[in-house]
Amino acid sequence: MRVNTRFWLISLALVVMLASAKGNSQPQQVGSAVAPAKVALALHTVTSGLVGVAGVAAQDMTTGAQIFLNGDEPFPMASTYKIAIAMTLLAKVDHGELNLTDMVDIDDSEWVYSQVIAANFIHQGVSLSIANLLEVMITQSDNTATDICLRLAGGPSAVNQYLGQLGIDGMRVDRSTADLLRDFYGVEPGRENLGKIVRIAAADPNKAIAANPEFEADPLDKSTPRAMLNLLTTLSSGRALSDESTRLLMDTMMRTVTMPRRLSALLPKNTAIAHKTGTVGGVANDVGYITLPNGRVFAIAVFTRGSQSPPSDRERAIAEVARTLYDYFSFL
């Protein structure tokens, strides 16, 4: 079913190209007028049964062709909101308020359950440069680094102000990861509380991966797929940051190692991809940029929510979306 859907999409794209050539008009004009609704239906088909609800937004950065599925519905961003935090912090670097080489002390009260800092630095006295904080926030999705970066950026209000300046509508950042995890697990931040989340997960492994309707219904830290796509396209266009900061962030996203079974899982080997993942409860997300064989790039945001399915199915849904759009944009 899913392979046949992708084959049908390739055929559709070829028909669009031929019709465009025969009518002496540009492919993206025909594609944007005829194909998007059918592609959205195909995306619904390949994700049905794998996730509760999927939201997708994608854009070919050369032609401008766009695809949306539930594009204007709000979804929990989870850790994908770290892109907005990174951009706000880098804007301060661009304005000379901070330097990437500035060393930042990490206080015990700021420690959050995380993949690098809290997991590996067991002793007091940790200081990292802003560049290294950004690196592990994006590539490893480190929560402690994220909250330090958010503090340096000026907090959620500063991030939202920056998003407003960029014209990003439909995205809001409200909480630190410490606050988010406290709302989800009921655990306070701080070095002394790190083990509590581990014990909660060990006692009830399903809690960490189960959909939480009350948590997901909370309006905090939400984005529509369209808003995330707008943030991605604004970043890659160079309109948001200096050339140096734009390259830094996009190169960092190329080094992401979390959740390799999502956007990249079904793509051809060695496909270039720059992305940021996000996971909490029944939410599995992945957003970023995928390079096509012809060198063109498309930006993609895949959000999910309300999934009672196994985590492997949620990741498969994101992979199916990425491959479907990869095939479609390759032939458009």
Image: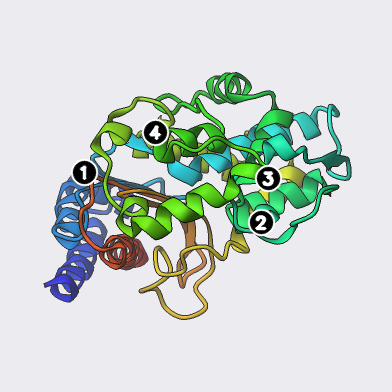
Q: Considering only order in the chain, which callout, 4 or 1, is on the residue closer to the N terminus?
A: 1
Q: Considering only order in the chain, which callout, 2 or 1, is on the residue closer to the N terminus?
A: 1
Determine which residue is flagged by label 3: 145
Colour logic: rainbow
Task: Report how far apart the C-alphas of labels 1 and 3 lie in the structure.
Answer: 44 Å
Task: Report how far apart the C-alphas of labels 2 and 4 lie in the structure.
Answer: 22 Å
Q: Which mark is residue 252?
A: 2
Residue 228: x, y in percent?
Answer: 44, 39
Assess whether mark 3 and mark 2 are in contact (beta carbons under 8 angstroms): no
Neighbor class of circle 3 (other Cα within 10 Å; few <14, some 14-19, many 20+) is: many
Q: Nearer the viewer, mark 1 or mark 3?
A: 3
Q: Is residue 286 left or right of residue 14?
A: right
Determine which residue is flagged by label 4: 223
Q: Considering only order in the chain, which callout, 3 or 1, is on the residue closer to the N terminus?
A: 1
Task: Report how far apart the C-alphas of labels 1 and 2 lie in the structure.
Answer: 35 Å
Q: Secondary structure at mark 4?
A: strand
* Residue type of the residue flagged with mark 4: Ser
**For the N terminus, which image quadrant?**
bottom left
Q: Quadrant of residue 85?
A: top right
Q: Secondary structure at mark 1?
A: helix
